[in-house]
Amino acid sequence: MSNHLKFFIDGAWVDPVVPAVLDVIDPSTEEAYTQISVGSKADVDKAVAAAKTAFATFSLWPVAERLALLKKVLEVYNERFEDIAQAVSQEMGAPLSFAREAQAWAGRAHMESTIAALETYEFSEKRGSTTVVKEPIGVCALITPWNWPLNQIVCKVAPAIAAGCTVVLKPSEIAPISGVVFSEVMEAAGVPKGVYNMVQGNGPDVGQVMAGHPDVDMVSFTGSTRAGIIVAKTAADTVKRVAQELGGKSANIILPDADFETAVRKGVQGCFGNSGQSCDAPTRMLVPADRHDEALGYAKSEAETFVVGDPRSEETVLGPVVSQLQFDKIQRLIEAGIKEGATLVAGGLGRPENLNRGYYVRPTVFGNVTNDMTIAREEIFGPVLSILPYKDEEEAVTIANDTVYGLAAYVQSQDIAHARKVAARMRAGSVYLNYPEWDTFAPFGGYKQSGNGREYADWGIHDFLEIKGIVGYGD
């Protein structure tokens, strides 16, 4: 716990310039279990100055040396793997098995894919007498969310360092302890002074200051669309690059030729995973109208298999959602679904039986949802599935694309050629056919109000690079 109240700046653990603390809440108990310090402009200034100084030399490191550094980070990450999982479990309320097999695993997997991508990445190419080079963009402000903390931290830190950039990270103040452990990993791996810096704090006092800082060259932000708009507006005054991975309301089209029961059940699982707290979750399930009632039966049966409870219990499948704020928002949206006439198939308002404290939400399924209902338009970010009937494939595609978001889409069919044709019409950054395994080499990012830029592997590295043309370079 010695570093919970400190920031990591210029290679050392330091106290905030202005002392201020924030309780960290265990969502399974609603009680504080530790505190963090929260930063201010003065802390951001120190971290950015350290990153700017370090950039002058780190940006010139050969690729082989950056590779060796990332491999050492991965080695130490694996040594601290259980500590990372325990931190995520307590700060998010994630069941320990999920914290290990999904949350902590994601950080490791992205580090591995970034290393693999860097090993073959081409930083220059010849075009006639011109040489085109890709150079690190500079000092990068990285702002990460609470729902997949290690996934997003590593998806930003690893490619930034692979590109030769220096960084200042602001983890979510709601789930901050995994960020502390990750910073300890970076320290133990021997990351040079100023290359990696971490300042805790909230959005207005730290995140926005980072976004508007004149010595920050790029902001990479993951979070809500509302907050992303604020970050982009703040960054605009200094004309810096902004990469954003924002909200989603992803459609899951189950075509008539799908293995119907399997498709519905897996769709429920996909929606409810991580207690529904994933921006790319398949939250709108589209089913043929003549099989709508059949879909409701399968969905109800599947939802009732999800054991909600103490994340420390081996029997628990879903833990709580992360905060009182999230719990209240989800309850408001469930109530809206009921009031607007959707059919409540499973779950509903309040906590599950036998749970009278903790931010636990009942796994909820709505049927007879129309795409103008609040639960079909707003990102709920909880274990709540909306099932919408469609009369034909054309209507399914229209409904799927009728959203301000475009992060992900899902298509289920036993005819892969058919699924590919429908995927081609989806206005989303990722389309998943027949529930594939997680691919950390695929590009990840959104269309429309789901953001811009792409993460994962070489796609992530590319986002942290500037393009320079040296004309007349010669042979």
Image (tube, grey):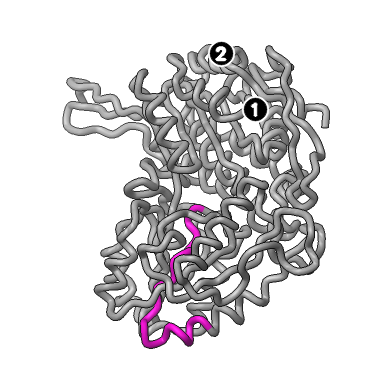
Q: Nearer the viewer, residue 417 or 179?
A: 179
Q: Which residues are magenta?
A: 279-296
The amino acid marked with disc number 2 is Asp
Q: Quadrant of residue 198?
A: top right
- State the SS at label 2: helix
Residue at the spot x=69%, y=41% of the render?
77
Which mark, by number, is residue 200? 1
Q: Is residue 443 visible?
A: yes
Picture quarter with the N terminus: top right
The amino acid marked with disc number 1 is Gln
Q: Above or below — where is 138 with respect to 404?
A: above
Q: Residue furthest front?
A: 339
Within the magenta stretch, is there residue 292?
yes
Left or right, 283 with respect to 42, comes to left
Residue 61's spot in the image, x, y percent? 50, 23
Q: Above or below — where is 19 with respect to 268?
A: above
Circle 2 sits on which residue?
45
Q: Nearer the viewer, residue 111 or 290?
A: 290
Residue count near mark 1 (Cα–Cα under 10 Å), binned few <14, some 14–19, many ≥20: many
Residue 53's spot in the image, x, y percent? 53, 12
Q: CA distance from mark 1 to mark 2?
A: 13 Å
Residue 426's spot in the image, x, y percent? 30, 62
Residue at the spot x=52%, y=42% of the render?
155
Q: Nearer the viewer, residue 189 or 195?
A: 195
